[in-house]
């Protein structure tokens, strides 16, 4: 590993959001958790974190943080038995919820997303849900042939309490775990980031050097490196930050590099009539790599701040 952190920084990691928001206080035995003391955006972050850590949501996107959500706060996908299912989640931090509330959320989602969406619609709420409300919701979802899942307040609390590190992120407890867990999360994120950068650039240098007949295959390898690394980083960083813009920027920069190398390689084979495109791609190689590394450095320094604070 080329980048190592000083050991003296080990216990200094601070959750960025903690510096801005006073977390609701609880004792370890308090039931139920005071979800109502979280604002709606903070509650969405909680739901997103639980979906990733408890239910294995992959490629998570926090749609709600952008404003208009079209009936969806969070989206991603889950793999079950080698099959991939798109997941759309609506988070509702309510003290009381009725069958009508559930159905209205379903209707809004249906109008905005069907028939193109072929997955499951989840409602995650801090409220209790009666059997009658569940039955009404299930009946309407079946009519529309929509897969569904409802997670009520007690289930959400059980999920959250089963992940002590996550409980500490959103609530202040009298016996809160120490910060070692967040330190480990930051360290793991940094290690993934470093490995991603090294592996991607090494593969980039070798993929299109004398292997022009394997362009498609090598492209797939490069895209796989990028996709898996960004997915892992998002899953890890949910504990540290709700801002994934820099990750998306790194992913976009990497894809531009792959595209430029592909153009250069195709031009070398005479497959492109406009050879200047390939020549330009080759001439901009170093500039594009520098751009990619600069974005990598921004994220690395951002993660390191958690240890320096």
Image (cartoon, rainbow, N blue to C red):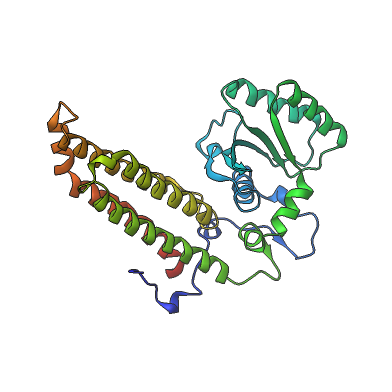
Among all residues in the image, which is located at the extreme front? Answer: 213
Q: Nearer the viewer, residue 187 or 254?
A: 254
Q: Nearer the viewer, residue 133 or 138?
A: 138
Residue at image coords 63%, 37%: 89
* Percent coordinates x, y for residue 37 in the rendering: 69, 50
Question: How many marks on residues?
Answer: 0
* Percent coordinates x, y for residue 250 in the rendering: 36, 48
Q: Nearer the viewer, residue 291 or 85?
A: 85
Residue at image coords 75%, 30%: 101
To which quarter of the image does residue 132 belong? top right
The answer to whether residue 129 is above or below residue 244 is: above
Which quadrant does the C terminus fall into?
A: bottom left
To which quarter of the image does residue 82 belong? top right
Among all residues in the image, which is located at the extreme bottom? Answer: 8
* Percent coordinates x, y for residue 273 in the rendering: 15, 26
Going by the image, does 253 lie left or right of 210? Answer: right
* Percent coordinates x, y for residue 87 in the rendering: 61, 37
Which quadrant does the N terminus fall into?
A: bottom left
Residue at image coords 32%, 69%: 2
Q: Nearer the viewer, residue 118 or 93?
A: 118
Going by the image, does 32 lie left or right of 284? Answer: right
The answer to whether residue 108 is above or below residue 278 is: above
Going by the image, does 114 lie left or right of 247? Answer: right
Residue at image coords 68%, 57%: 24
């Amino acid at each position: 590993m080329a980048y190592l952190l000083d050991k003296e920084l080990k216990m200094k990691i601070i959750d960025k959001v903690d510096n801005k928001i006073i977390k609701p206080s609880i004792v370890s035995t308090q039931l139920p958790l005071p979800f109502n003391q979280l604002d709606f955006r903070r509650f969405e972050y909680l739901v997103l974190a639980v979906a990733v850590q408890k239910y294995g949501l992959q490629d998570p996107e926090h749609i709600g943080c952008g404003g208009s959500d079209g009936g969806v706060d969070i989206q991603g996908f889950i793999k079950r038995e080698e099959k991939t299912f798109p997941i759309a989640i609506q988070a509702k931090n309510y003290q009381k919820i009725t069958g009508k509330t559930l159905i209205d959320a379903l209707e809004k989602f249906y109008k905005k997303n069907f028939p193109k969406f072929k997955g499951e619609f989840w409602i995650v709420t801090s409220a209790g849900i009666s059997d009658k409300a569940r039955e009404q919701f299930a009946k309407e979802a079946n009519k529309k042939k929509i897969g569904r899942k409802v997670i009520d307040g007690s289930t959400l609390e059980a999920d959250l309490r089963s992940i002590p590190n996550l409980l500490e992120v959103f609530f202040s407890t009298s016996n809160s775990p120490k910060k070692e867990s967040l330190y480990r999360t930051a360290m793991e994120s940094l290690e993934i980031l470093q490995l991603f950068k090294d592996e991607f650039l090494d593969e980039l240098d070798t993929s299109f050097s004398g292997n022009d007949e394997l362009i498609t295959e090598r492209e797939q390898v490069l895209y796989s490196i990028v996709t898996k690394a960004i997915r892992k980083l998002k899953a890890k960083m949910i504990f540290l930050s709700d801002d994934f813009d820099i990750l998306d920027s790194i992913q976009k920069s990497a894809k531009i590099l792959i595209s430029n190398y592909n153009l250069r390689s195709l031009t070398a084979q005479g497959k492109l009539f406009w050879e200047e495109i390939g020549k330009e791609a080759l001439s901009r190689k170093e500039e594009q790599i520098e751009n990619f590394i600069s974005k990598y450095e921004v994220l690395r320094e951002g993660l390191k701040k958690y240890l320096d604070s």
